[in-house]
């Protein structure tokens, strides 16, 4: 898709991947509407601070972005949060909060913007999932459930809108160096995963890959691409992957 002069609404744009993607898209000539609870005014871009778990705020956000730009060509559902608790004892309120942000906010925003995209017969929804959209991580079971839901929603939304000019891309990053781990609602990751941080990617590198993927109208972006090996192993040899994951998780129980 052509990027220049497009209008993109990016959620979770105050830090990490969302902030880096905003910088990357701005450099490619995209006009931006940025949101997060702690979003501060920006000299060039429209900003709107608020809590995306509040449905009324989501409606206000889209209405104000439409007032400002008259259209939304690209929706990036990036805001998300994690929860490190076993599913069988997870805090119910925290779990609902995570599903509201990671799944229902993304769905509601798509419902608010896709009709306009369909009318104009062009647009793109970019959902920031995770490698946990493709593989269930046992230290992150319910987070994985939200990201699997986002993946199914993305695939379905793409097929529903294939004849209406609306594209949908799912992004599945591995570990990215951001404040995400510090912002989890409850718990902490297994210590063994700390060694995996050596292989972490950076938000600016991921943002570049996302922008390239958008330009090429890709369906799914697994980043880094080596993550596809894990996805394939999970598909074809799930017992081996489960055994490996249980080993990583052992001291976490
Ligand atoms: N970092 C990773 O390793 C990694 C890997 C795979 C996927 N992801 C996914 O990437 C996305 C971005 O994560 P990140 O790594 O950039 O984490 P981050 O630095 O913690 O950023 C999260 C963003 O979401 C916003 N946010 C959180 N709760 C919100 C709420 N209730 N309402 C509105 N905005 C809210 C935060 O801003 P405020 O706090 O100001 O609201 C922030 O801008 C998430 O969907 C995450 O699941 C991350």
Image (cartoon, rainbow, N blue to C red):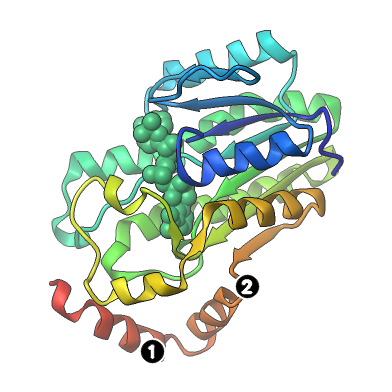
Q: Residue at x 48, y 81 (%)?
A: 234
Q: Earlier in the sequence, mark 1 or mark 2?
A: 2
Q: Is label 1 within 8 A of ligand 1 (CB to nearest ligand atom)?
A: no
| Residue tagged 2 | 225
Task: Note whether ligand 1 is within 8 Å of mark 2.
Answer: no
* Crowdedness near tag 2: few (<14), some (14–19) or many (≥20) residues, C-alpha within 10 Å: few
| Mark 1 lies on residue | 239
Q: Position of residue 138 (x, y in %)?
A: 29, 70
How far is mark 1 from mark 2, CA to CA? 22 Å
Image mark count: 2
Seen as rendered, the residue at the extreme top is 67
Q: Position of residue 147 (x, y in %)?
A: 45, 55
Rendered residue at 43%/85% (across/down): 238
Q: Secondary structure at mark 2?
A: loop
Mark 1 and 2 residues: CB-CB less than 8 Å, in contact?
no
Please, what secondary structure does the residue beneath circle 1 have?
helix
Quarter of image, res 226: bottom right
Q: Quadrant of the C terminus?
A: bottom left
> Where in the figure is residue 10, as x and y percent of width and height?
58, 33
């Amino acid at each position: 898709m052509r990027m220049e002069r497009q209008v993109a609404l990016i959620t979770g744009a105050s830090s990490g991947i969302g902030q880096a993607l905003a910088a990357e898209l701005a450099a490619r000539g995209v006009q931006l509407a940025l949101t997060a609870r702690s979003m501060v005014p920006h000299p060039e871009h429209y900003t709107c601070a608020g809590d995306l778990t509040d449905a009324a705020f989501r409606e206000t956000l889209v209405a104000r972005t439409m007032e400002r730009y008259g259209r939304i060509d690209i929706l990036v559902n990036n805001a998300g949060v994690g929860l490190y608790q076993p599913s069988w004892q997870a805090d119910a309120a925290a779990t609902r909060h995570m599903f509201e942000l990671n799944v229902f906010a993304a769905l509601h925003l798509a419902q608010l913007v896709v009709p306009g995209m369909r009318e104009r017969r062009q647009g793109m929804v970019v959902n920031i999932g995770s490698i946990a959209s493709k593989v269930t991580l046992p230290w992150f079971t319910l987070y994985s459930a939200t990201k699997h839901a986002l993946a199914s929603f993305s695939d379905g939304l793409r097929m529903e809108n294939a004849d209406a000019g609306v594209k949908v891309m799912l992004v599945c990053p591995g570990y990215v160096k951001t404040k995400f781990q510090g912002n989890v609602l409850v718990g902490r990751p297994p210590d063994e995963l700390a060694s995996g941080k050596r292989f972490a990617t950076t938000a600016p590198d991921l943002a570049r890959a996302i922008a390239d993927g958008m330009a090429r109208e890709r369906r799914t972006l697994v980043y880094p691409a080596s993550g596809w090996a894990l996805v394939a192993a999970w598909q074809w040899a799930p017992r081996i992957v489960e055994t490996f994951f249980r080993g990583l998780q052992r001291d976490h129980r």
